[in-house]
Amino acid sequence: MSIREDQAIARGRRKARIRGKVFGTPERPRLSVYRSASHIYAQIINDETGVTLAAASTLSPELKGREGHGGNADAAREVGSLIAAKAKSASISQVVFDRNGFLYHGRVKALAEGAREAGLDF
């Protein structure tokens, strides 16, 4: 087994462990984060109904035209503030954070800090 396969298996285990504990409700939906090599994505999900209430990414029209790379911490911070703004417009102030198996470091941490700075509580 290659190192990349081992990493994917380890992330899958972390993801399953986290999802066993984190559940989004209508009062406090789940903020789920996914990062790829080039972009970062965030969505707010009500797990009781399975509905996405708000979504933002580096590919969102509000951020797509900006200069620079979409896969860095500065872009992640902007996505965090954008998802917080969309949450506020949907009258959501509190969420539970789902890092989706990714380590709370770098871009995932920058997205969380950006959302907190913009007023999202978790």
Image: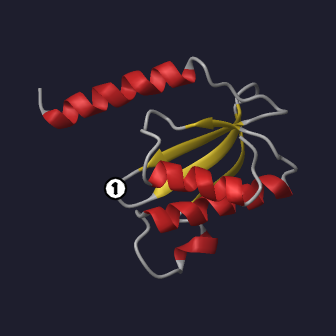
Q: Which residue is mark 1?
A: 37
The answer to whether residue 76 is above or below residue 95 is below
**Image-based side of 72 in relation to 19, left or right:** left
- Give the quadrant of residue 60: bottom right
Residue at point 49% right, 49% down? 108
Q: Secondary structure at mark 1?
A: loop
Q: Quadrant of the N terminus?
A: top left
**Image-based side of 64 in relation to 7, left or right:** right
Q: Quadrant of the C terminus?
A: top right
Residue that sits furthest to the left in the current view: 1
- Give the quadrant of residue 88: bottom right
Residue at point 36% right, 30% down? 11
Q: Nearer the viewer, residue 90 or 81?
A: 81
Look at label 1 and name its amino acid.
Ala
Q: Position of residue 87 (x, y in %)?
A: 77, 52
Q: Position of residue 5 (x, y in %)?
A: 21, 31
**Image-based side of 70 in relation to 8, left or right:** right
Q: Position of residue 91 (x, y in %)?
A: 88, 50
Residue at point 75% right, 25% down? 48
